[in-house]
Amino acid sequence: MTNFTHLLILIKARWMAFANYLARPNKDKILRWAMIAVLGILFVWGDYIFFYRIIQYLDGLPFSIGEELIVQLLNVVFLTLFVMTIFSTLIVSLSVFYLSADLEMLLSAPVSMGPVISLRFMQTVINSSWMILLFSIPIYVAYGNFFNVPWSYYFYLFLGLIPFILIPCLLGVSGVMALIRYFPNKKTHQVLSLLGLVFLVGMVVYLRFLSPEKFFGKDVSDEMIILFVEQLRAPDYSFLPSTWITVGLVRFVEGNFAPAFVQLSFLYLAVTALAGLGYWTGRKIYFVGWCSMQEVWNSPPDNNGKREESFFLRRIPLSRVQRSLMIKDMRMFFRDPEQWSQMFILCALVVVYIFNIMNLPLDNLALKNVVSVLNIGLVGFVLSALSSRFVFAAPSMEGREFWAIYTAPVNLEKFIWTKFLLFFPPLLALAEMLVVISNYLLQVDGYVMKVSFIGVFLITGGLVGLGLGLGARYPMFDYDNVSEISTSTGGVLFMILSLSFVGAVMVLVARPMYVHFNERFLFKSIGGIDVPICYALILVLALVVTVIPIRQGVLALKEMDL
């Protein structure tokens, strides 16, 4: 049998497993998918409207500056998509190629190595890029609709996105294979840490290079605007795939089809060369690297199995069973590089977030206070993403060995609340740090600082409770790699509900803040009983979102047929 036949057999097996999942719908599945479909459509539509209005505003700027800024907006979107796909691939491919549970069976089957690598690469592409594409495609559609482009524009966009997504995935997979094969396996964690730090520093330097605050100063001349637009051209390096696809789209919209297809040819030439090189090197080094990885992971610990509890854990006021469960979860987290390596993305987001707050051109005190209120929602969105990856996946991380917890003398309610105590403090510390530093830089008054502090506390508790509750309600114990958990139907449902929860809190807190700003800046007293009612509703909503999902999740675990 040829390699292509082997690949078709493997793809058919994966498709049959997926089709088997879809072929047995029940009321719960149908309801989940319906909610996800409705809320997902609303989200994509909101994303489209938001960027359409941005393009509309930029197009109205004088001196044809708007056209240049729109092009740079596309370039920044493509560049961000490219970098995030590379880093996401580095994390996902480590699990898909080396840590998946079915690899031992697959690599021992009478199948050539080439089809196995090809199949795993397809899985990596899907898992690492689908969410990024979902966020970015409405931007391209908004650009096309604003300029009334023909339908051939979307066909060109489709042809360009295929190699544009494959190029960073090929780079990421090849990088992981080289690390596992040629670096000491026990130092793989450190190498991934270095890559994360490089990614973090690169983002900060890039943002500092742009210096966007110069464009929004209160004394801005025409010369300064033109100079700023000229400086924006610096990231347009001709060797970057993001530049190729940006220039190609712009030329296609302008009607210059020959240059557009030249840029498209660059993308396909690059992906063909990388695919051929990656396929050839993968067949040479992948299996050897996988064998070495198994030796390291199955080797005894350096301390001969003796593990001491840390000073902190020994002093947690918990029962012996809860303390043991917490120690187990912490060790599982730090042993899995796919989990803790994603903390570098978090660090990058934190640095960029604070950097942007520092450089906001807010000379008006009232505007600073308004931005500080918006911080509550922005921090909530960051926490939603983190909870989707870590908190929601926590119950499923027990894997196929969950039967040990289920049959042990462990109260399942305490089991879930122990995970709550594990995730709530670090997420709360991160969220409060962002809010306090941001409000300090914005020089807000004490009232706004208190509301922000308490609001973020309630949002954090609600998101952790919602994540653990839905994670227990829709667990995925039989997973091949961790990235599949947060992208399951339950994970998508959690992301939508968590963002809705944050939005509801922001709507409720808007009225008290409006009353406060009127009293402080306009000297108008317009508040009444509506202010304490809003605060009471926020408290009740946070308690409901925290407690009820956990209770429902515990009941689902108790009724589960293992």
Image (tube, rainbow, N blue to C red):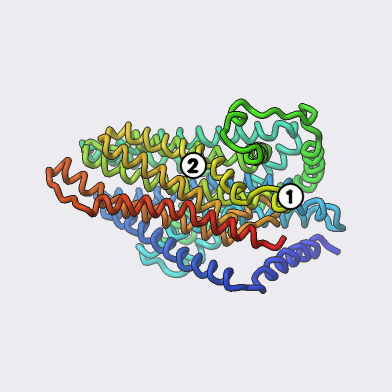
The residue nearer to you, when weighing 283 against 48, is 48
Query: In front here: 189 or 528?
Result: 528
Q: Residue at x 25, y 52 (%)?
A: 511
Looking at the rendered structure, the secondary structure element under dot 1 is helix
Label 1 neighbourhood size at 10 Å, few (<14), some (14-19), many (20+)?
few
Residue 220 found in image quarter: top left
Residue 349 appears at what percent x and percent y? 47, 40
Residue denoted by label 1: 404
Q: Vertically, is 522 above or below 310?
A: below
Answer above or below: position of 5 versus 548: below
> Residue at position x 58%, y 69% from top?
29
Counting from the top left corner in percent of width and height, residue 343 is at 55, 39
Dot 2: element: loop
Choose between 532 and 345: the one closer to the eye: 532
- Residue 271 in the figure: left or right of residue 469: right
Disc 2 target residue? 237
Please state, as top left, top right, bottom left or bottom right, where the C terminus lies in the image: bottom right
Q: Is residue 76 visible from the viewing direction of this image? A: no
The answer to whether residue 326 is visible is yes
Residue 342 is drawn in which quadrant? top right
Which of marks 1 and 2 precedes in the sequence?
2
Closer mark to the observer between disc 2 and disc 1: 1
Side of 493 relative to 22 (left or right): left
Residue nearest the observer in this picture, 19 or 264: 19
Amino acid type indicated by mark 2: Tyr
**Residue visible at 31% across and 53% down in the picture:** 508
Q: Position of residue 262 (x, y in %)?
A: 53, 55
Number of marks drawn? 2
